[in-house]
Image (tube, rainbow, N blue to C red):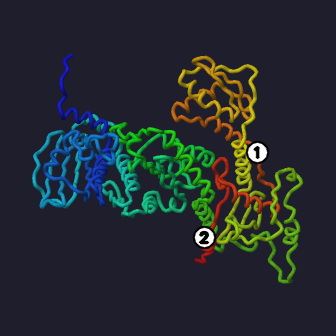
Amino acid sequence: MTIRQLSETLINQIAAGEVIERPASAAKELIENALDAGATRIEIATAGGGKTLLRVTDNGSGMAPAELELAIRRHCTSKLETDLLDIRTLGFRGEALPSIGSVAKLSLLSRTAEAGEGAEISVTGGKVQPVRPAAANRGTVVEVRDLFFATPARLKFMKSEKAEASAISDVVRRMAIAFPHVRFVLSGSDRTTLEFPATGTDRLARIAQVLGRDFRDNAIEIDAAREDVRLTGFAGVPTFNRGNSLNQFAFVNGRPVQDKLIWSALRAAYAETIPHGRYPVAVLAIDIDPALVDVNVHPAKSDVRFRDPGLVRGLIIGAIREALAREGDRAATTGAAGLMRAFRPEAARPAAAWTPAASPYRPFETTGAAPNHFREQQASFADFATPSARSEPVFTSPSAREEEPPQRHPLGAARAQLHANYIVAQTEDGLVIVDQHAAHERLVFEEMRNALHSRAVPAQALLIPEIVDLSEDDCDRLVAHADEFAKLGLGIERFGPGAVAVRETPAMLGEMDAAGLIRQLADELAEWDTASGLKNKLEYLAATMACHGSVRSGRRMRPEEMNALLRQMEATPGSGQCNHGRPTYIELKLSDIERLFGRS
């Protein structure tokens, strides 16, 4: 077999298979070039989902005629000199334009601020046309037509025009969030115009443009640093969640990334606050020394590798949990919106649909005496606790006998209990409806978790130690964390070069698969250098015990018990949602109530 040098066109087509996977990949590369050129206005036009036409227009610094010739050559770039560990731009490989030109019809029209006229160059299936003068505004216009016409086999793997157009929209949204000072406009024959006006330094305003105003009302700001890494951004309150992960955005030094370490840390940060199958809404930006992160992992530059992944993961989890403990107890505004929607159909019912005859109550009399059923309710209000419920937990409050103004407390003062399950409390500017079982379940769980973390977990000794065969590397990692496991009730020690002996297991877990647990911990340590599986199992058991040990639905509560429950909720982090992630209360503002009655 004879070894030969591949042609330049074939080399570029091979590179295009890595860099340009679909129209959205081409859009991403062209938008990155515009941003690196200092553009403050970027317009993207598409047709046929980007397969027929993709045009990116910017007002950046532009290129001189001689630079146009270099721009369409492979490995020619203005963004990198010699140090691959000091990358401060979005693009740097010098492969995007020649790769696109090898599989499509590409034209570049550009003019610098100093030039009197612009210049244009075209590439069709790898064939370059000479540079020619052309009229142009300052900046650059890159037009891509008939993408993959030179490699028809690639077109068979393209999705529908609607799906490809949606992927381009997603790219533009991510770029818009990362660069709020830039105006983005996306238009085309296959879409309505999508426009994101510049918001300057107000990142939350730009995020609200992309994710909607609801996120702005339910976002918690994050700003934390550890060593040479800083994390900023916004995370939604736990009760503001979605059915997929499309509303999670991550950026490293301004670069949009899809990194499994970041997503894993985000899931861990929201553990036990969001229901299974639901996803938090978050926008996270990591600023790190370029020497501590490798963005050259893949030609698409969407994957990164951190020099210290444990540090980054710990920072994300710690910062988000601290923010949730600080502000995450507030109810999502979408809960109140849902409550409003539930009321409106009844409110809109014609008056003729209700007649006095349909009411089970007799009209009020003006004799001054209250009806009997009201007097009976007043007499029994102080004795809501039924005999069967007296063995359940009882809340006590030092100020139970005093009527406290609702404005003194965020969750207000209890006014009633509905259906022996829901507490209605009056706040300064509205009302709160609390699910008593879900709320107390969270309080009990937090008490158990605090006890779990404040002292060593009781352990049960195995009559016969269980020997688990592992690789030497896994054994080394497990033994290095033996002290940490001992605090959680798991006693292990080295047993030869390729095995560990399990001598104790947490008493809370009862009879268990010790070998399976050890292998799971070994896998976690190998991937993340941290083992949270055992702690998660113990916390899951605590959550289950809390669910069965909390105030049950259907129990009548005294007014002082209801108020004491509200005060404990205010003092407990994470009380805005139960252990399963459901909201524990819904808040309705007075303005919303007035709207229901047509007062505003």
Q: Estimate how packed mark 2 is, as few (under 14), some (14 to 19) or many (20 or more) residues with alpha carbons within 10 Å.
A: some
Relative depth, front residue between 579 and 352: 579
Residue 551 position within the rendered picture, expressed as x and y whole percent measured from the top left: 78, 52
What's the amino acid at mark 1? His
Separation of marks 1 and 2 at Cα, in angstroms: 36 Å
Q: Residue furthest front?
A: 227
Q: Which mark is residue 592?
A: 2
Which element is circle 1 on? helix
Q: Can residue 267 be spotted in the picture?
A: yes
Give, as a three-letter code, the residue at label 2. Asp
Position of the C terminus by quadrant: bottom right
Q: Residue at x 81, y 57 (%)?
A: 395
Q: Which residue is mark 1?
A: 548
- The residue lying toward the viewer, choosing from 471 and 141, is 471
Secondary structure of the residue carrying tag 2 is helix
Point out the residue furthest to the bottom here.
367
Q: Position of residue 264 (x, y in %)?
A: 52, 41
